[in-house]
Amino acid sequence: MGFNLSPDKITLRQPDDWHVHFRDGAMLGSVVAPTARVFRRAIVMPNLSPPITCIKAATNYRERIMQAVPEGIPFTPLMTAYLTDDLLPEVLEKGYRDGVFAAAKLYPANSTTNSAMGVSDMGSIYSTFETMERIGMPLLIHGEVTDKDVDIFDREAVFIERHLEPLLKSYPDLRVVLEHITTEHAVQFVEASGSLIAATITPHHLHINRNAMFSGGLRSDFYCLPVAKREHHRLALRRAATSGKPCFFLGTDSAPHPRSSKESSCGCAGIFSAPFALESYAEVFDQEGALDRLEAFASEFGPIFYGLPLNSDSITLKRHKHVVPDTFTSSQPITPDQGLIPFHARESLSWRVVENG
Ligand code: NCD
Ligand code: ZN
């Protein structure tokens, strides 16, 4: 009540990122810091090569992530298991009960980066869904079909119809996050589902439509999966994110790739949004006159869905126009030819994170 809709400063409960890719090795050393400086927790994607398919791999990876967190910064990585055709439900159950796995991630085989070992037939892992439903473990879904005869811009909508609807009918108590939604169909589907179904929304899908990939040439920096869609879908996502509905919450899908992998004849999908992610969301909420709803989207609806406590620290953003650098600089630089391009490179943003705590 009485929230000033064009304040110069906003203080939020510290947010969490419910979908991030940290990679491994030298890249991991560089990309954890920008997330940990702003977000208190993050759901870490398991699509490494090889993927995280057992408890030991998850605890080792969590250890490597913690080594990359700058000193003195409290940060908790929440680990996920990568579902394959033959990952045993008992492993998931043990990992979840032991507090190692916060959730399991379903990549339809060959849907995106490092998903070749993903699930080739959802029908064959129904005992896994049964276990997850019974223990209340969230299922995180990359919701796209992979059939070559389905147009790439329709793959999310077709996945919902062909796979998600039947899955939820069979397992009505399964907790599902439809990750990085990109279409009006997904928005409507999630809104119409019960409180066990939620969706994450990325900053890039709130800012760009599919034209961005072709503006003035082929712009691989804007290529990600699911691919950005038409303008009316972007507008539906902006309405959803700023709606104040608890089924939509923050997940950046920050997905760094070395420059050489983005700028190649077969470039990788993924947008590195971590460095200015909260600023990017703030821009959208400000433009939509909904800054008063940013805190719930960024800091409340995610933990409520996952059944975790809300963070107690706060973070402040100030209205301050600044230009995003054209490359990401890290205190632990990865080799120069791996230079990472942050989302919004060379664009100006109106908000800046100023303090933590
Ligand atoms: C992600 C990646 O690079 O790991 N890429 C992407 O475009 N989002 C994988 C994913 O989340 O689809
Ligand atoms: Zn992702």
Image (cartoon, rainbow, N blue to C red):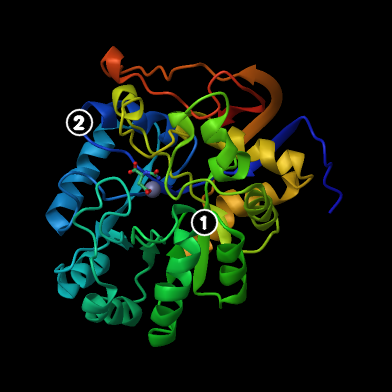
Q: Which mark is residue 181?
A: 1
Please tell me which residue lies in front, 293 or 316: 293
The residue at 30%/13% (across/down) is 336
How many discs appear?
2
The residue at 19%/50% (across/down) is 51
Q: Position of residue 335 (x, y in %)?
A: 26, 15
Quarter of the rendered image showing ligand 1: top left
Tell me which corner region of the image, top left, top right, bottom left or bottom right, holds residue 36.
Answer: top left
40 is higher (above) or lower (below) than 320: below
Which is closer to the viewer, label 1 or label 2? 1
Label 1 SS: loop
Q: Which mark is residue 25?
A: 2
50 is higher (above) or lower (below) than 325: below
Q: Position of residue 24 (x, y in %)?
A: 23, 35
**Which image quarter is the C terminus in?**
top right
Three-letter residue code for mark 2 = Gly
Q: Are marks 1 and 2 in contact (CB under 8 Å)?
A: no
Residue lying at the far top of the rendered structure:
336
- Mark 1 to mark 2 CA distance (whole Å): 29 Å
In the picture provided, is 102 more to the left or to the right than 326? left
Please tell me which residue lies in front, 87 or 146: 146
Asked if the residue at label 2 sits under 8 Å from ligand 1, the reply is no
In the picture provided, is 108 more to the left or to the right than 39? left
**Which image quarter is the N terminus in?**
bottom right
Tell me which corner region of the image, top left, top right, bottom left or bottom right, holds residue 314.
Answer: top right
